[in-house]
Amino acid sequence: MEILDKTDRIILGLLQANARLTIQEIGQQINLSKTPVHERIKRLERAGIIDRYVTIVDKKKVGNGVMVYCQVTLDKQTRDTFADFDAAVRELPEVLECNRVSGTFDYLLKIVSRDIETYNRFYQDRLSVIAGTLHISSFFVMAEIKNSTVVPVD
């Protein structure tokens, strides 16, 4: 990975806070003209440091009032079993995050659903039937204390 200088880090912080900032607005905040700001952003994109630009949607306002974390254990910890599970989970739009982890279970999933009943159908019809799934523990979020997409770049 390329070394990021202070200006790159400031640009990344600004874009993470508001990806709709114009190059001119960024330049005004960091006291640079549009051309060097544009060149820096393009370099960060080419290097893969800026992965993509997204819109953050309020889950509840679009009808997804339930968030669940699931610990998933597979029946075998083999390359093929992991690959099959990975591929199946990528096809489930309800799964916002899926991470293979170390410890007493294999995966930690973050899932959104309209309500408990909808989650139960998802669990029974789509999640628990993935080949190789041995055990699933579901944890319902009672209150979301912090939710951020900002990665520290300091």
Image (cartoon, rainbow, N blue to C red):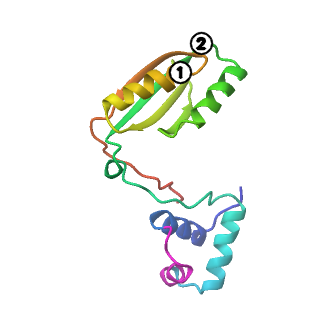
Direction bottom: furthest residue: 33
148 left or right, relative to 3: left
Q: Secondary structure at mark 2?
A: loop
x 66%, y 65%: residue: 44
At which x and y percent is residue 148? 42, 52
Task: Please name which of the two marks, 2 or 1, marks the residue nearer to the observer.
Answer: 2
Mark 2–mark 1 distance (CA, rounded to whole Å): 15 Å
At which x and y percent is residue 142? 27, 35
Q: Nearer the viewer, residue 36 or 42?
A: 42
Q: Residues within 10 Å of mark 2 (few under 14, many from 20)?
A: few
Q: Nearer the viewer, residue 113 or 69?
A: 113
Please tell me which of labels 2 and 1 falls first in the chain: 2
Question: Does the stretch in magenta take in 138?
Answer: no
| Range covered by the magenta-colored residues | 19-29
Question: Does the stretch in magenta take in 23?
Answer: yes
2 left or right, relative to 122: right
Check residue 75 in the rendering and tell me which mark sits there, or answer none.
Answer: 2
Q: Secondary structure at mark 1?
A: loop
The amino acid type, in three-letter code, at marker 2 is Asp
x 34%, y 39%: residue: 114
x 64%, y 78%: residue: 38
> Which corner quadrant holds the N terminus?
bottom right
Direction left: furthest residue: 142
At which x and y percent is residue 28? 50, 84
Q: Which residue is mark 1?
A: 103
Residue 54, relative to residue 35: is it above or below?
above
The amino acid type, in three-letter code, at marker 1 is Gly
